[in-house]
Amino acid sequence: MSRAEPTDAQVLAGPREGFGLLFERYSGILYGYCARRVGADLAEDLVAETFLTAFERRDGFDQTAPTAQPWLFGIVTNLLRNHLRTEKRAWKALARTGADPLDGAARVTDGLADRVGERVDAAVSTRALAGALAAMPRGHRDVLLLHVWSGLTYTELAEALDLPIGTVRSRLSRARARLRSALPTDASTFTSGDTR
């Protein structure tokens, strides 16, 4: 008879030694998200800092939450705010030159330009996309990138960012509108998104 894996809440409430299980479950997706935003080197540090912060604040985790993923994305998004200049410089460089400044496994536009690529000239749409993201208010960019790159639902986004769900919907709608106005008309299907 196999023993069931502990839930995220059980891991967070359990002994220190079990915390590695939470790292195994979520470090990869957090790393991918961070690497896309600020590059591979800084992403490693941010993921480590996220789990250190989570461990220190584990008493504040809502034990009724079905998963710790939105909570962890909230922590990493707050940590990313300290690195906003790095991310904004990357978007501006990409908008200006068309060359992705972040080396490594993840690129600034992974998951975004790929969805536009077949319908418009990739160089033009990538530069327009990067320019729109660089000019976007931080709160709108956070909601959009969390939604696109992590796949969080509106409810999970609200939990991760500690915002009312109406604010999440509004910010996501405004972010998509900014992208629609910045991208060629053929790329508008990218910004329509789903309505989870």
Image (cartoon, grey):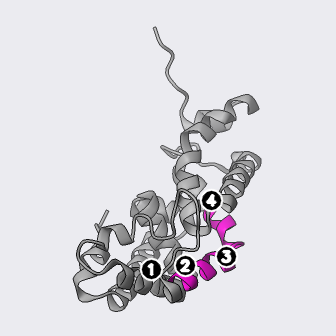
Q: Secondary structure at mark 4?
A: helix
Nearer-N-terminus badge (3/4): 4
Q: Is residue 147 left or right of residue 35?
A: left
| Residue identified by numbered label 3 | 86
Q: Residues within 10 Å of mark 4 (few under 14, many from 20)?
A: many
- Give how far apart the Cα atoms at labels 3 and 4 are: 12 Å
Q: Which residue occupies the extreme top position in the image? A: 1
Amino acid type assigned to the residue bearing label 3 in the image: Thr
- Spot occupied by residue 109 in the image (x, y as percentages of width and height): 45, 70
Amino acid type assigned to the residue bearing label 1 in the image: Arg
Tell me the magenta residue range.
75-94
| Residue identified by numbered label 1 | 171
Residue 49, magenta (yes or no): no
- Spot occupied by residue 108 in the image (x, y as percentages of width and height): 51, 70
| Residue identified by numbered label 4 | 40
- Spot occupied by residue 2 in the image (x, y as percentages of width and height): 47, 13
| Residue identified by numbered label 2 | 139
Q: Nearer the viewer, residue 96 or 137?
A: 96
Q: Secondary structure at mark 3?
A: helix
- Give how far apart the Cα atoms at labels 2 and 1 are: 7 Å
